[in-house]
Structure formats: structure tokens, C-alpha cells
Amino acid sequence: MSLLEVKGINKRFGGLKALDNVNIQVEENTIHAIIGPNGAGKSTLLNCLVGKLEPDEGSVTFNGSSLLNLSPHKINQLGVVRVFQTPEIFGDLTIMENVVIPALAAHDGSFSLNFWNRTSSRKEVMDEAEDLLRDMNLIDQREMVASSMSRGDKRRLELAMCLIQHPKLLLLDEPTAGMARADTNNTIDLLKRIGQERNITKVIIEHDMHVVFSLAEKVSVMAQGTVIVEGKPDEIKGDERVQEAYLGGAHL
Amino acid sequence: MFGTNTARKDMILMASFIVVVLAAPIIFQPIGAGYPDLLQKFAIFGIFAVGFNILFGLTGYLSFGHAAFLGIGSYTAVWSFKLLGMSPIPAVLFGTLAGGLFAFLIGIVSLRRAGIYFSILTLAFAQMSYNLAYSVLTPITNGETGLRVLNSDPRILDEKNAEYTGSLVSTFFGVEMNGYPGFYFCGVILIITFYFALRLNRSPFGMKLRAIKSNQTRMAYTGFNTRPYLMAAFVISGMYAGLAGSLMAVTDPLAGAERMQWTASGEIVLMTILGGVGTMLGPIIGAGVIKYFENIFSAFNDQTLNAIFDFLPDTLQQGVVAVVSLFVGSGWHLTLGLLFMGIVIFLPGGLMEGFRRIYRMIKKPDDDKSDTPAASTAPAE
């Protein structure tokens, strides 16, 4: 059985059909890329997976249970974690706090009223956060306020925040958008390494073909709200429909 | 925030706080604020401000109707006097609980919205409570006259004396809760509630509240249900307000509707911003400054001014007094307004930011190196 099964989902915004009968199956422990031109419905699809939007029709099944009509925090607690296109971090808090908070969500659940003990007395959480920051090369800045980081570091921090939750499924919305090639390559290496070490299934929305072909094991190509082609990266590369969708008919 | 020495710093903060509160009559003597009535106000509004800051400072939700909980605390306390007797303990307990309960009810509706809409909803509820207390609820609140304890009230726990004609005062184990004993009663409660707020601030709960203020979207996608967190913060700060209101009744067993008016709600917002939103001590200092202005500056008249500027030549003295008198006496609001404008423009972090800047200026020359990034970026208390 696939870890994530999206079956026949439709989503309309007024007269616009943003998603039209989309079917996607994500297998466990793979990296699945979703590509497509702007307006193809990639982000809408992602929003339907994390509870930001409800599809009009169809089903979304994760690990055997439906994700429909669940609020974002419940979907997160099931193990579906999202990295945003523009980093969503706690800008006013320190880097360490930014990582400790999601760790607490993973340990204590969606609500716990612990207003008496010091946060620093949670040894296991603090250690875990420090280890991860060390791993992500952010440990030296641990007491820095997150909003003062560079954009690339913010992305790395957001990824760290997602990883500390031990997700089963990690959704990444253009993780390398606006990055220089060197940084992009670092991110690719990081994502590959994480996949091997932690057994996390990943869904990546990406424009950069370099990233897609270095990472993905399976690619779904979307255009005008529907999946037009699906297959291994090598199969996609030569497909005429893909080139048409991306390049408007001109051939590579 | 997680530095190894924050626990020690908090101990020092708490110890100095206790010393300042207990020695307040001596410390505030030189600035003319060492008398019990004003000290009681410092303590009561300090509690109110600390509680308000748990909501506004941590979650960023600006309640514009917090005086409603203050008023409800006062009414509940007076009813406790009327029915149970003049002991301050049940009055304070019931006042606190009533504040929390009302905060819960108002929170159910208000917390559905954030930002300015939340502020407007809380303001609307507070004005409703004020008008109800004034008119429809007169049997409970005694309307315009205000609720007071009468000798004929049941007071089932008290030994009654039918011949007694003087006014009734709350008594705690035989000690009357006015004057200095009244201040120390409020002062000890201020210390306890301050300690509670400090613990809350350093706990995972407090950190999550700050995270909600910083990015509520991320909180939801991080697996937190933000609504119960906001509700808990709202109820806790409502309980602080109820407690402050009941202490007002303990020091002076009388409750009036004007305590719930929007000007009173606005005052607590001013106190918190003036002192420093989100800081531990700031709101208490803000409350102190405003109450000091209200009581001391407003008492200045031309005579006192003439006495102060007596050393100047006669014509100059008249001119100076004429100008200064605009800012004192009934014009104390003008001084407060200017001070507030100055703070908001030059010190957006309130008086606490000013103190921090001064502290850094003094500290820098001797040990520049110990001023690590941690010290300059971590939000101070």
C-alpha cells in the first residue's frame, strides 16, 4: 500500500478548476517530485494535503486514514509536515527555541498546559534540539533571534524544525527557490542524506530540473490542474507532452 | 533564553523584587509616594498589569476590555463580604474565580478573531458589562450608587454587632485591611503572582505563547492547537484582573461600575506599553508611573510650585510657574501624554528598554568581551 494516496480530487475556485481529477500515489521511503508550469495546481494540491484547503471531491488517504476534514495541527500530529515556499519560522524567537517548540509538539502533543517547569529542564528535548542544530550547522547561532538570519539559513532552520518532529511524510514547496547553485547543491545533498538516515518519505514541488533529476525517484508532471505524465525521471525527460507543457511546444 | 545562568538571574530578580516590595514604604518615601493608599494602588495595578501582560505581552492579543474582569472581581468580593463576612480570603478567591469564569465566557466568542477584531470584541463586551452594571443589573450591582457592605447584611461567618454604626472594613485575623497592613496584604499577593508569571514565562507554555505571537500559522502546521493556548492565557489574565479587582474591594469595600469603563481598560494598555510589553518588570513599573502621576502630579498647585521655584527672581518665577502649572494639577494628563508619546517614539520597548540601554552604556567600557551575542539578542526580563 502507498503511504499517501490521492484519489480523484477536484478543487474549484469560482469558475476556475484548480485541480481536476488528480490521482497521485506516493510510495514509502521515496522522493516524489511534482513539477509543472506556474498555475498548474501544485501548491493547491499541497494545500489540500495539509488541511489548508478542502478538496471539493475525492479522497486523500495517509497511512490508511483519511486526511479530509482534519485541521492542520491534527494532520501534523499524524506525521505529515510541511516546509513552506517562503520560510515560516518564529522570527521573534531564538534559533534554539524555534527548534525546541516543534520538538515539544512531537513529545507532548497538540496541547499541554505545562506552565510551571522551566523549558530547559526538559533534558531530552534540549539534547535532541542541540544535536539537530549541530547536524544542520546552526549550533553556533543558537541564541540568535531567527529573523536576523539570512534567507538560506532560514530555510535550513525551517527544515530542522520539520525534521525534529520525525515526520513520516515531508512536503517541500520549492525548497531551493531563489538559491544560488552552490546552496542548491548543498540542499540536495542534505535532503538525500536525511532520506537515507531517517526513512522519511518526501514530496517535493520544484521548478529547478537540476534538483528534480538529482533527487526524485518518481516524477508527476502537472498542467492545468491535472497530472499529465507520471514516471521515473528518465522517462519524463524525453516525453513530448512535458516539453510542450513547459516550453509551449518548442522542442529541446 | 536557555542560557545556564538564566535560572540564577531569575533568582536574583525574584529576591530583589521581594526586597523592593517589602521595603516599599521606605524606598518610595523620598519621592512622596510612601503612604499606604498609593502603595496599595501600586501593588493592585501591578498585579493587574502583570496579568494583562501574560495575554498581551506573550500572545500579542490586545484585549481592550480587561477592566470588565477587574470590575467583576470587585463586585464578587463585595458580595462575598455581604454574604460570608469581612474576611479577605473568600473575597479574593471568589473574585479571582469570577474573573477567570467571565474571561472564559468572553473568550469563547472573542478568541474566534485575532488582531483588531479581537480588541473590538473585548471592548464591546466590556462596555456591555459596564452598561449592564449601571442599569439592568442594579439589584446585583446597586447601579450608580455602587455596591457597599451594610451592617444588616447576612455575613454568616462574622460575629455581628447590631449596635455597630461605623463603616465595615475587611479584617484578616483581626487586622484591618487598610493602611500598611492592607498594603502588605496586596504586596504579598503581588509577590506570589509575580513569581507565578515568572515561572509561566520560562515554561514551555510561555514559550509556545510567544511562538503564537510570532507566527500563528507555523504553530498550527507544527501540530499545536492554538485556540486552547490562547484561551488558557486569556483566562489566566482574566483571573489576575479579577484578583486585582477583589483586592480593590478588600482595601476599600466598595464596588462601582466606573471601574469597568473603557477608560479603565485603556489605562492598563497604557501602563503595559509604557513599562515595556512582554517584559517581566515593565508592566509593574508602568503601573507605578501612571498611578504616581495620577496621585502626586495631580496634587501640585500654584502654591507648591511657587514654593519650588522660590529661588528664581520674581518675574521669572511667575513665568515659570505659569508654564509648569499647565503640566501639573488637573493638567497631569498632559505630562503623561507627552511622556507616553516620547516613549512610543524613542523607546518602543518601553521604560525597560530605556533601562537596558543605560545598563549597556555603563557596562560596555569595562567588559566588552563578555557581551556575547546571547546577551544582546535574548529578550531580557
Image: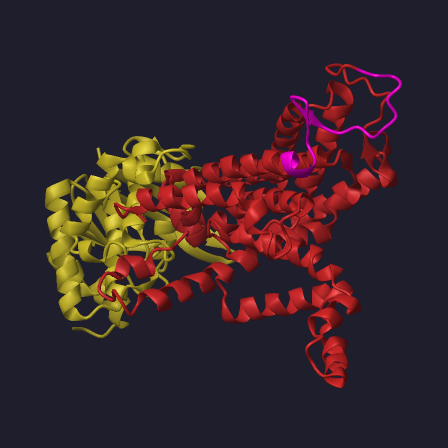
Chain colours: A yellow, B red
Is B78 left or right of A112, judged from the image as shown?
right
Q: Which residues are magenta?
A: B160-182
Image coords of residue B318 (percent x, y): 77, 80
Depth order, front residue of A242/B26? B26
- Is B163 colored magenta in this rendering? yes
Is A233 left or right of B93, judged from the image as shown?
left
- Is A185 colored magenta in this rendering? no
Q: At 34% across and 50% down in the image, what residue appears?
A: A46
Residue A9 in sight from this viewpoint: no
Depth order, front residue of A194/A205? A194
Depth order, front residue of A123/A155? A123
Is B281 left or right of B74, judged from the image as shown?
left
**Type of secondary structure dominating the magenta stretch:** loop
Depth order, front residue of B377/A204? B377
Using the rendered view, name the quadrant where residue B307 is placed.
bottom right
B62 up-or-down from B175: above or below: below
Residue B152 in sight from this viewpoint: yes
B57 up-or-down from B370: above or below: above
Is B197 left or right of B241, judged from the image as shown?
left
Q: At 39% across and 52% down in the image, what residue appears?
A: A19
Q: At 35% across and 44% down in the image, what residue appears?
A: B222
Image coords of residue B286 (percent x, y): 57, 55
